[in-house]
Image (cartoon, helix red, strand yellow):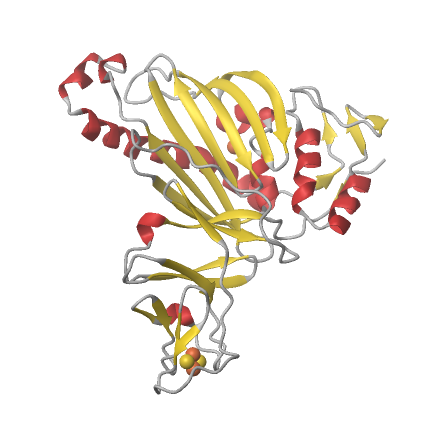
């Protein structure tokens, strides 16, 4: 029995965070990569957001180098303008727009401060969405971006890889609070743990977290710190940019504190909103430093199918079975065959997939 590394196709279907809403002010133009395509995001004068391919269908200008005119993106080459549907509304010469001058619009949704673009390897329309969550009592998002050699499935696998929590991050007292649950494109995991280091000179509190994963590019981690009476929300947002590369945004928000004195008596003297923002600034730095511990491992690891799982691992088998739905039928069938046997402690258990949660 050999453990064979195999590679994953680069861009599974799903919603991917392509930008944060606060990056797209009126009149701004951004270019981001998704699944080997350059995508231009712009916000017109009315506030409407457009998301279209970067390639101008006229003579190949790059729309990401253009500018916003009314609610359109204007190509820098000959001044053709395209609206958010991708239709050419005028040429740079005042002549009739040619019928073929149509640029591909991307499907996207706006959710709690993010723009999430839909990608499907076979160009199918979305069959599921990501739910909205209330944000009125929460700080605006702060985020940190990593560009790395990896795959979104490997990054999302971290959520169920219980074994690495202590080894890579030094988390203590890791507990699984509920078994892994899957429902269509949704996966839910529930843990409690402690960070090893102290924050602001105090002992780290116990954190209870519920991971809401939708597809392979979006996870919302709802955290409760019972000792502090504090709630934080973390997002893990991997986006396949080109083959073998991912842009990973981690983002964070904190529910405005009601009783900061529960963290430390001296904190009662500060305005609560300002204090919450300060804590968020420190917390996103800590969160980024945790993820920076994963990055060098992701960059050189390979996808092993079947994996040689041991007692102490998380529900990797169940996660991988769930993840197959985001690939084309032929890719999914290839892995089903590759992973239909699993090794544990040198023992080969044919046809048995391990679920340890
Ligand atoms: S290439 Fe875009 S207007 Fe000509
Ligand atoms: Fe990790």
Query: With 307 as the anchor, is 72 left or right in this view?
Result: left
Which residue corresponds to the image point at 35% horizontal and 87% vertical from the top-left?
A: 93
Q: Is residue 251 above or below residue 21?
A: above
Residue that sits furthest to the left in the current view: 269
The number of discs equals 0
Q: Is residue 224 above or below residue 327?
A: above
Residue 14 at x, y = what percent?
Answer: 57, 47
Quadrant in the rendering for residue 3: top right
Residue 76 at x, y = what percent?
Answer: 36, 77
Residue 288 at x, y = what percent?
Answer: 40, 37
Which residue corresponds to the image point at 60% horizontal and 25% vertical from the top-left?
A: 163
Residue 27 at x, y = what percent?
Answer: 28, 63
Q: Is residue 139 above or below residue 20?
A: above
Image quadrant of ligand 1?
A: bottom left
Query: With 63 as the anchor, is 294 left or right in this view?
Result: right
Q: Quadrant of the N terminus?
A: top right
Query: With 48 as the anchor, is 118 left or right in this view?
Result: right
Which residue corresponds to the image point at 74% horizontal and 25% vertical from the top-left?
A: 354
Q: Is residue 35 above or below residue 343?
A: below
Quadrant in the rendering for residue 298: top right
Q: Quadrant of the C terminus?
A: top right
């Amino acid at each position: 029995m050999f453990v064979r590394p195999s590679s994953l196709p680069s861009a599974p279907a799903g919603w991917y965070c392509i930008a944060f809403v606060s990056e797209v002010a009126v009149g701004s133009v951004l270019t981001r990569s998704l699944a080997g395509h350059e995508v231009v995001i712009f916000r017109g004068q009315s506030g409407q957001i457009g998301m279209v391919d970067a390639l101008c269908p006229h003579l190949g200008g790059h729309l990401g180098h253009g500018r916003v005119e009314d609610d359109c993106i204007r190509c820098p080459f000959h001044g053709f303008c395209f609206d958010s549907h991708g239709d050419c509304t005028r040429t740079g010469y005042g002549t009739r727009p040619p019928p073929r001058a149509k640029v591909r619009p991307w499907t996207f949704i706006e959710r709690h401060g993010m723009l999430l673009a839909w990608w499907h390897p076979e160009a199918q329309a979305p069959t599921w969405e990501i739910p909205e969550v209330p944000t009125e009592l929460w700080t605006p998002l702060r985020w940190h971006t990593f560009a790395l050699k990896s795959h979104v499935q490997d990054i999302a696998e971290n959520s169920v890889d219980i074994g690495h929590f202590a080894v890579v991050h030094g988390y203590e007292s890791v507990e699984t609070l509920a078994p892994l649950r899957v429902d269509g494109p949704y996966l839910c995991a529930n843990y409690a743990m402690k960070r090893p280091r102290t924050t602001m000179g105090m002992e780290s509190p116990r954190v209870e977290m519920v991971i809401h994963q939708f597809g392979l590019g979006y996870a919302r981690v709802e955290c409760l710190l019972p000792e502090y009476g504090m709630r934080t929300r973390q997002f893990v947002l991997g986006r396949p940019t080109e083959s073998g590369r991912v842009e990973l945004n981690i983002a964070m928000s904190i529910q405005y504190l009601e009783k900061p004195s529960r963290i430390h008596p001296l904190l009662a003297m500060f305005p609560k909103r300002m204090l919450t923002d300060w804590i968020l600034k420190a917390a996103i730095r800590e969160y980024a430093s945790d993820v920076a511990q994963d990055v060098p491992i992701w960059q050189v690891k390979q996808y092993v199918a079947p994996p040689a799982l041991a007692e102490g691992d998380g529900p990797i088998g169940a996660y991988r079975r769930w993840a197959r739905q985001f690939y084309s039928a032929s890719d999914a069938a290839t892995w089903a065959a590759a992973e239909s046997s699993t090794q544990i402690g040198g023992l080969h258990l044919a046809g048995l997939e391990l679920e340890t949660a």
